[in-house]
Amino acid sequence: MTGLGGRIGRLSLGYGLATAGGAACFSLGTPLPWMIGALLTIATARMLDLPVATSRWLRNMGLVVIGAALGLNGTPEVMAHVAGVMPVIIAAAIGSIVIGILLSRILARLGRVDPVTALFASFPGGVAEMAMMGEAYGGKPTPIALAQMLRVVVVVVAMPLALAAAGAQGHIQPLSARLPFEPLGFALLMVSGALVAMAMVRVGIRMGWVIGPIAVSLAFTLPGYPPSGVPNYLIAAAQVAAGATLGMGFERETMRRMRRFIPAALTHVVILVSCCAALGLSLAWLTGLPPAVMVLSTSPGGMPEMTLTAKALLLDVPLVTTFHLVRVYIVALTAPLIFKALRRRLERAPQPAE
């Protein structure tokens, strides 16, 4: 299939399969069903070379929906609570970054990649951001992107299931679902959120598609004027759009070329997730914060995915969101500085045999 008709056909097949996968997971009662189902279905289709496609525009609009819903939970009382634990949030962000740095040596050895590539593959940052930054400092973008993608996918699939199996269930009903749906108010949220997001992305803030709508929603919610709730069916559609795009990363030829690196990357992800979970549980024990919230907050998954997991399990969404927001900014600001501080040590480290 070629041309516009072919593109429409691939999109229809892709989103049809993604929706079917989400519906299957929903019927099974899995947590975060629409995202996990869409992700696994599209990943399988890609590995089978089926002619599926997804739309980055739809993914971005899905993130705007998610961001708008997250920001509606930021009441003055909630934000005062979040501000009160800011030292813990910063400590958790720094702790997860340190864990990634330490574990990069394991990835370099097991995956037979150079230390620079391993370092940027281990930072708990965005897939595209770390790949581009790593390449700028001499790393190899493909293994960095693959390791980052595997990290997000493993966490997205495993974390909700593990927390649900452990009985982690909160009681905080998201405000976004309790507010009445007002079409004009929702349109205001979406248009203004999308405009702010585009402006942020234009100046280089790639997480702007989530951060921008959160900021817009907070601007309405903090003074006490939330314009509209966000219905669950729109959250489900946004999850399908986001999960399908994650699944598209499993391109068959790339996975074939990187087949020797993938087991090392998966081993690294398991160790990374375990260490970050231990950090979260330790901070929960020290501070008295809920263990499940702290495990999600320190998890090396993506911010939209982990906050949606918190929402699905009725946990403290604003707290989890703030933990991940702070870490995103700290990683973006410190990754180049950390590389420069470690440059000599990285250059002296053994290089992989060709």
Image (cartoon, rainbow, N blue to C red):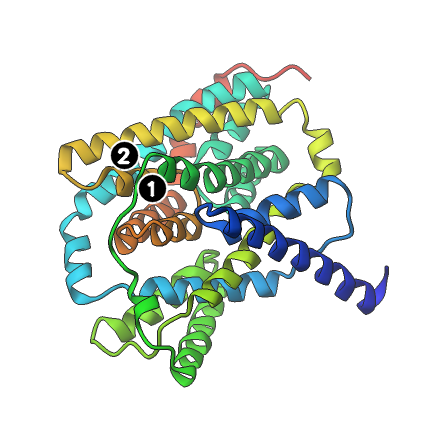
Q: Amino acid at mark 1?
A: Leu
Q: Sort mark 2 into few (<14), some (14-19) or many (20+) by Cα contacts within 10 Å.
A: many
Q: Nearer the viewer, residue 114 or 303?
A: 303
Q: Residue at left 69%, top 56%?
A: 14
Dot placed on the residue nearer the N-terminal end, 2 or 1: 2
Residue 246 x %, y %: 58, 48
| Residue 265 occupies quadrant | top right
Residue on which disc 2 sits: 280
**Is residue 94 placed above or below 111 in the rendered structure?**
below
Residue in the foreground of this view, choosing between 110 and 283: 283
- Residue 193 is left or right of residue 84, and the answer is right
Q: Residue at x 46, y 74 (%)?
A: 195
Q: Which residue is mark 1?
A: 296
Q: Quadrant of the N terminus?
A: bottom right
Does residue 291 lie above or below 107 as drawn? below
Snapshot quadrant of residue 330: top left
Q: Is residue 139 above or below residue 317?
A: above
**Residue 328 location (% of width, % of height):** 38, 48
Element assignment for label 1:
helix
Q: Is residue 200 visible?
A: no
Does residue 349 appear in the picture of this structure?
yes
Q: Residue at x 47, y 71 (%)?
A: 194
Q: Residues within 10 Å of mark 1 (few under 14, many from 20)?
A: many
Q: Position of residue 36 (x, y in %)?
A: 53, 47
